[in-house]
Image (cartoon, rainbow, N blue to C red):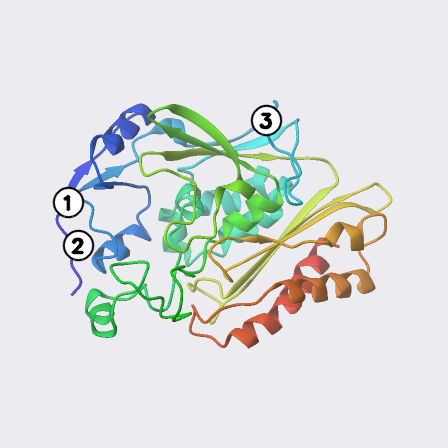
Amino acid sequence: MLRLPAFRYHRPRTIDEAVSLLARFDDGDAMPVAGGTDLMPNMKHRLFTPGHVVSLNGIAAMRGIVAVNGTGPGSRNGGAHGGEGPRLRIGALQSLADVSGHPLVRRHCAGLAEAAGLVAGPQLRNMGTIGGNVCLDTRCTYYNQTEFWRDALGYCLKKDGTVCHVTRVGRKCVAAHSADTPPNLIALGATLTLAGPGGTREIPAADFFVTDGIRNTRRAKDEILTEIAVPVAEGRRSAYRKLRQRHSIDFPLLSVAVTGDFAEDGTVTGLTGVVSALGARPRVLAGWDAIAVGGRLGTDVIEALGERARAQCRPLENIIVDPEWRRAMVPVYVKRALRALA
């Protein structure tokens, strides 16, 4: 039986109190927890051994899904859609089940609703939060194992070791980003709000992730993701497709999020594709506007976009599935997502 390490449990009632608790302890000895569906198993595997666990579940200000009017820093960053205007405000503590079934999300951000509804199984979606999914730790065949297993093989760069067992060279961790909702948030031009000791700051979802498999987000250890703002617009559509070994529970082997803006006559005015589970961060696919904008999303355009995506994607052996097969699935799932969009 895998047991949790000893820790002290804290349950603050406000964001400021939670931030204060995280900042009080040095060297990352405190970690926030919401649903705990990823953190608890990782603690049992001794991937994390915090002395203090700060529960966010008592913070009412981090809940709710509402439509608001206003302005924000959203802009077309790497192809992401944003700007001023109405948006959905989603509290970071909102469960994935609530996000997937909420009428406002389903109406304005269908791809995000699909993604939230494909995370794990219903029990985990009822517990897991969208904030936790956005901040999900990267995963790797050689990392997400018990301490006994990792000790027998030899520890890796991401935890206690000096060698990457995937590349076998260099000093860069290539653990894979495996969360479902972030590719959709990037494609939709969402903005994330972080609270820390110095106050709050906003960061576009497209800028939140970095190519570091050890710690792949710009969130500091004493910061909390408090809410997500997603711009909405008439004529905007989104879709999501996920490749996994079984059609339930599993993390993605490949995920594809697409968002398009369409004129009244059906012509494309903007198109974004984001793939993930191939590297340490989601990747915005380049060159799509040049292929699609000004025309209709027909068969020839979809075929060209699928091949363009394949040329940009080269999976690694960080997941126990043949990387060439995963690459061959890129155009298949991109085209499926685009046909749903059309």
Given residues 172 and 202, the one toward you in this image is 172
Q: Secondary structure at mark 3?
A: loop
Residue most toward the front?
170
- Where residue 164 sits in the image (x, y, percent)? 36, 66
Asked if disc 3 and disc 1 are in contact, CB closer than 8 Å, the reply is: no
Residue 64 occupies quadrant: top left
Q: Residue at x 60, y 49 (%)?
A: 111
Q: Quadrant of the C terminus?
A: bottom right
Residue located 16% across and 43% down the image:
51
Q: Is residue 236 left or right of residue 183?
A: right
Is there a contact, CB below 8 Å, between mark 2 and mark 1? yes
301 shown above or below 235: below
Label 1, residues with CA under 10 Å away: few <14, some 14-19, many ≥20: few
Residue type highlighted by circle 1: Phe
Q: Position of residue 46 (x, y in %)?
A: 21, 57
Which image quarter is the N terminus in? bottom left
* Picture residue at 43% right of the left edge, 68% below the top: 318
Q: How many numbered dots are placed on residues in this image? A: 3
Q: Is residue 122 left or right of residue 303?
A: left
Provide residue 16's location: percent of width, then percent of height: 31, 24
Q: Which residue is mark 1?
A: 7
Residue farthest left in this picture: 6
| Up/down of 108 relative to 323, above or below | above
Graded by Cα atoms within 10 Å as few (under 14), some (14 to 19) or many (20 or more), the crowding at tag 3 reads some
Tell me the CA gap for discs 2 and 3. Answer: 41 Å
Looking at marks 2 and 3 on the same chain, the residue that comes earlier in the sequence is marked by: 2
**Residue on which the image places disc 3:** 72
Name the residue carrying label 2. 4
Which of the two labelled residues, at mark 3 and mark 1, occupies the earlier sequence position? 1
Residue pictured at 79% horizontal, 55% vertical = 291
Relative depth, front residue between 210 and 322: 210
